[in-house]
Image: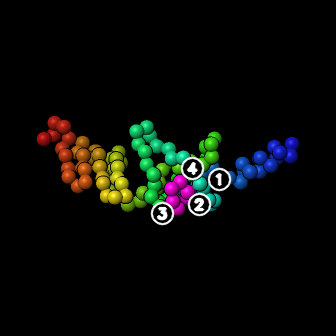
């Protein structure tokens, strides 16, 4: 009984989600300090947020996982996709069907 109560107390103290600042590798500081969390993303996409990125951490059955990072300064239309790296590489898929790679625009197939 005592052990069950202690485990319940610990579970109640942990947040279900947290917005934390990445402090290096798989470490981040939010309401708590998080270490060695996993990164989750759609199949085929892998990422590692850079230091100082604001990461969204959510509770899973195996502890906290990073579900992504907050990006505020994009000028995307609803439905568009932007892939970018900290080094400046950038691929944008536009609603018009155009693809923009590092500033060079490629027309949609059949729109030439």
Rounded to the nearest angstrom, the CA distance separating label 3 from label 4 is 16 Å
Residue assigned mark 1:
15
Residue assigned mark 4:
37
In terms of sequence position, does the residue under pointer 4 or pointer 1 come before the other? 1
Rounded to the nearest angstrom, the CA distance separating label 2 from label 3 is 12 Å
Circle 3: is it few (<14), some (14-19), or many (20+) Cα within 10 Å? few
Q: Residue at x 25, y 50 (%)?
A: 101
Q: Secondary structure at mark 2?
A: loop
**Quadrant the N terminus occupies:** top right
Circle 4: is it few (<14), some (14-19), or many (20+) Cα within 10 Å? some
In terms of sequence position, does the residue under pointer 2 or pointer 3 come before the other? 2
Rounded to the nearest angstrom, the CA distance separating label 4 from label 1 is 15 Å
**Residue 52 — which label?**
3
Rounded to the nearest angstrom, the CA distance separating label 2 from label 1 is 10 Å
Region of the chain picked out in magenta, as a range:
22-28
**Residue 30 — which label?**
2
């Amino acid at each position: 009984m005592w052990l069950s109560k202690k485990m319940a107390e610990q579970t109640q103290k942990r947040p279900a989600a947290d917005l934390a600042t990445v402090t290096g590798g798989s470490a981040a500081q939010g309401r708590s300090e998080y270490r060695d969390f996993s990164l989750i993303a759609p199949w085929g996409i892998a990422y590692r947020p850079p230091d100082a990125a604001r990461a969204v951490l959510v509770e899973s059955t195996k502890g906290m996982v990073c579900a992504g990072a907050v990006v505020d300064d994009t000028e995307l239309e609803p439905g568009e996709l932007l892939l970018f790296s900290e080094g400046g590489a950038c691929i944008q898929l536009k609603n018009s069907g155009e693809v923009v790679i590092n500033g060079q625009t490629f027309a949609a197939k059949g729109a030439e």
